[in-house]
Amino acid sequence: MASEISTEEKIVSGTASVLLPLALPKPYDYKVPAGMEVRAGDYVIVPLGPQELLGVVWGEGTGEVGHNRLRPVAEVLDAPPMPAVLRRFVDWVASYTVSPPGSVLRLAIRAPGALEPQRMRTAYRLGDERPARMTPARTRAVEVAGDGFARTVRELAEEAGVSDSVVRGLVDAGTLLPVDIPTEVPFDDPNPAAPGVDLSPEQRDAAALLRAHVDAEKFSAVLLDGVTGSGKTEVYFEAVAAALKQKKQVLILLPEIALTSQFLERFERRFGCRPAEWHSDLSTRERRRVWRGVAEGRAPVVVGARSALFLPFPDLGLIVVDEEHDAAFKQEDGVAYHARDMAVVRASLGQFPIILSSATPSLETAVNAEQGRYAEVRLEARHGKAQLPDVTAIDMRADPPERGRWLSPVLVKEIAKALEAGEQSMLFLNRRGYAPLTLCRTCGHRIECPQCSAWLVEHRFRRELACHHCGYTAPVPKACPSCGAEDALVACGPGVERIAEEVVEIFPEARVAVVSSDNLRGPAAHEEVFRAIEAREVDIVIGTQIVAKGHHFPWLTLVGVVDADLGLENGDLRAGERTFQLLQQVAGRAGRAERPGRVFLQSFMPEHGVMRALVSGRRDEFLQREAAARERVGLPPFGRLVGVVVSAPDASLAQKIAREMSRRVPRTDEVSVLGPAPAPLALLRGRTRLRFLVKAGRNVNIQSFIRAWLEDMKIPNAARVTVDVDPYSFM
């Protein structure tokens, strides 16, 4: 694939500006030694203090430091230079998120081993010479090698059914000639001409519109808005095929690893091979292989998590953001960015289209489509004979569960009907573990995390208490840590493990699977459990949000939401929107094939607007009400928010810094600063946290305000001030 930036890889002479992957405000200048050729984008080794570090040449030196005072570039690495469009993207993200450019660069070089030359291995091809004596074994080896392919000694011996010594004898005789071949497995080329599934007329029209955007070879953002089960994936696969026909690379972003296995199988069925993967569970060796394959244009399609956005694509021609509404696209540690929004920027910088796909679009994306900034393609019907499920709210005030249980009798009866019909059921509760709180019934003590302002969650299967914020774990104590009373600790509230316990008690013959991040580690575990569900080896699935989206189980006809009100309790400005999205996605798992689906929402507030919208199916009306409510008070997407958190291991230090920051707030009528106040998680990983919330109009350059506010602040090494532009959660 031709590089999109070859004309911009200019030779740098004299001095080079080098950006280092450190929290530094700008690149540093280095001297280019005589005889060394350095280009913009080159990966180089440079000295910094007593050590040598990896960096990227950002361009010509600035001249701020005299040439005779500069230290020289030590080495230019043998790797394709970082594309100019990626360097511009790094600068853009740094500016937008008010982050040091070096911190953003670190996101783009997370596989440093890939910058080393690829290791080679020795293989052998058939030459013209033949040994004086040909045995039957040698004849078989020569016949196998006659196809012209290079093989190692072991590979050729196995294929020919001979010993290694026979092959080595042919090498010594000059019959087999050595060649160097890469140790890494090559990437397969997807076949864009391979026939896809039969599309409905509605799907064909949608696919044609997406292909037209790809064929235009310029920037555009398109919302692919389709109900659950409408075949959005097969539709945007047509756009992927169009980009591949243009010999362009394609990036498909998924919010979670859990979605990967079924997606890869669908991709392979459509294009004849699997794409490259990029996520946190890859081995170091595979990360090097994929990073280098992308940089050299050998990896045509990458399916990955949000960090894949920073891979060094030389010829990217399409980005697809699947489940674009998903909160998992928001990075909150380190550089705080939203991969969906930054993907739009990446497409704009590269001048190619981006497709945002969802059954429940985010309010930001929906407003952009309504206002004409994004094009919109709709799929109103499910594919084939499948119909959208009926949704019913169970009023838990009228139909409460039995004492000590959590499932309404109405839902229990529906599960029994599904079991009798040989169909599958799914119970959804977005709460891991056995119980979210453990308290002492003698003294009322609640067991908290010693490092966070959060309760410890009981995991009965593992016999431990765990903090889901910092990872702290401890055995379940036999006595109350406060009063010492034995056998006085009681689990309060349900998690998925507790629901599973109840289900097994009610339906002892049913085959039950608990699906949460606690008991599924890595893609292989996800793939195994989802394969079992698809193969009907499971009758009742009990899961967290891992099961909420992207999965297709033909025999799953019943979905029950155990606590539909759960997401409405946190006071987040997006609480209603996110609850609606999550429950709509969960509901969409039911009835995706020929059997009709049924969805039951256990709620103590069935009159709530979110519940009414889910039952009635009036999604657009819900979004319009949500948009109007936010617009009235200037909240996103109609206004700007920035979260600024001060944290320190000592509470008095955090308070001192916050007071000083309060005194330094720039005075302007365009921006209001609320706080400081304790963050909702006021203690996290042993650090006290105070939060400011900065609010401004949509057209205010809020980044300039933040920089002016913080630029002269002297922050002690023990403390941190983190900035989150466009915060997605408010913890």
Image (cartoon, rainbow, N blue to C red):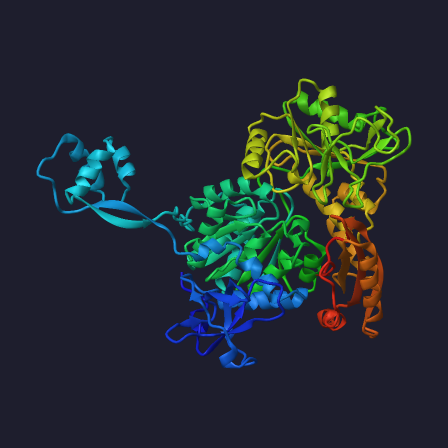
Q: Is residue 242 left or right of residue 567?
A: left
Residue positioned 84% across, 39% down in the render: 606
Q: Position of residue 570 (x, y in %)?
A: 81, 47
Question: Residue 49, relative to residue 451: is it above or below?
Answer: below
Tell me where residue 485 sits by quadrant: top right
Q: Nearer the viewer, residue 729 or 169?
A: 169
Q: Is residue 574 left or right of residue 358?
A: right
368, 268: nearer the viewer: 268
| Residue 153 in the image, given as x and y percentages of width and height | 26, 39
| Residue at the extreme front of the image, as rendered | 50
Residue depicted at x 47% and y 47%: 286
| One can see residue 20 in this view | yes
Percent x, y of residue 261: 54, 40
Q: Nearer the viewer, residue 310 or 665?
A: 665
Rendering quarter of residue 297: bottom left
Left or right of 246 on screen, residue 364: right
Q: Residue furthest top?
A: 509
Which image quarter holds the N terminus? Answer: bottom left
Q: How many marks?
A: 0
Measured along the vertical axis of the image, is residue 657 above or below residue 266?
Answer: below
Residue 718 position in % (x across, y down) = 73, 58
